[in-house]
Image (cartoon, helix red, strand yellow):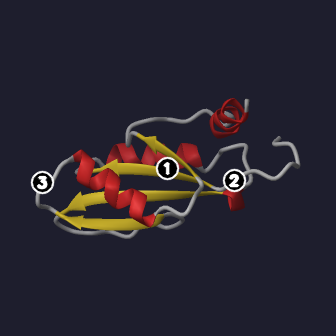
Amino acid sequence: MMDSFNHPDISIIIITKDRRKYLKKTLASLKNLNFPKAKYEIVVVEEADDPQEIDGVKYVFIPRKNKGFGYARNTGLRHATGKIIVFLDDDCEIHNGWLENTFRSIQR
């Protein structure tokens, strides 16, 4: 478990487009993180025709205009509140110590 020292808030930004099946697996693995839930947020930026809110995340809908990855990432950055930003692909399955290890490596 994470030490009791104060650490900055972290925003995990996930960009997705037409990949709900993969995104669900990624979000399920993020729910098992060994990290205080109050210290991170998950921002999902989805380009789609039919927006569908996702429980437990900050959901940002982008109408389908094919503006690209950079546009979607910048949109995610505008909605993120963390001091540390982490981009994650929508098809990753995360180990439960991933965020803790990432944070510790930043603190070195």
To which residue does mark 1 refer?
A: 27
Q: Is residue 45 above or below residue 30?
A: below
Amino acid type, callout 1: Leu
Q: Which residue is situated farthest in the left direction here?
A: 65
The residues bearing labels 3 and 1 have C-alpha atoms spaced at a distance of 24 Å
The residues bearing labels 1 and 2 have C-alpha atoms spaced at a distance of 22 Å
- Which residue sits at x=83%, y=41%? 1
Q: Secondary structure at mark 1?
A: helix
Around disc 1, counting alpha carbons within 10 Å, would you say few (fewer than 14), some (14 to 19), or many (20 or more)?
A: many
Give the x, y percent position of residue 57: 50, 63
Left or right: 30 in relation to 50? right
Disc number lying in front (3 or 1)? 3
Q: Is residue 59 above or below residue 37?
A: below
- Which residue sits at x=49%, y=50%? 27
Disc assigned to residue 66: 3
Label 1 or label 2, whichever comes before in sequence order: 2
Label 3 or label 1, whichever comes before in sequence order: 1
To which quarter of the image does residue 82 belong? bottom right
To which residue does mark 2 refer?
A: 8
- Which residue sits at x=68%, y=30%? 105
Amino acid type, callout 2: Pro
Label 2 or label 3, whichever comes before in sequence order: 2
Left or right: 99 in relation to 68? right
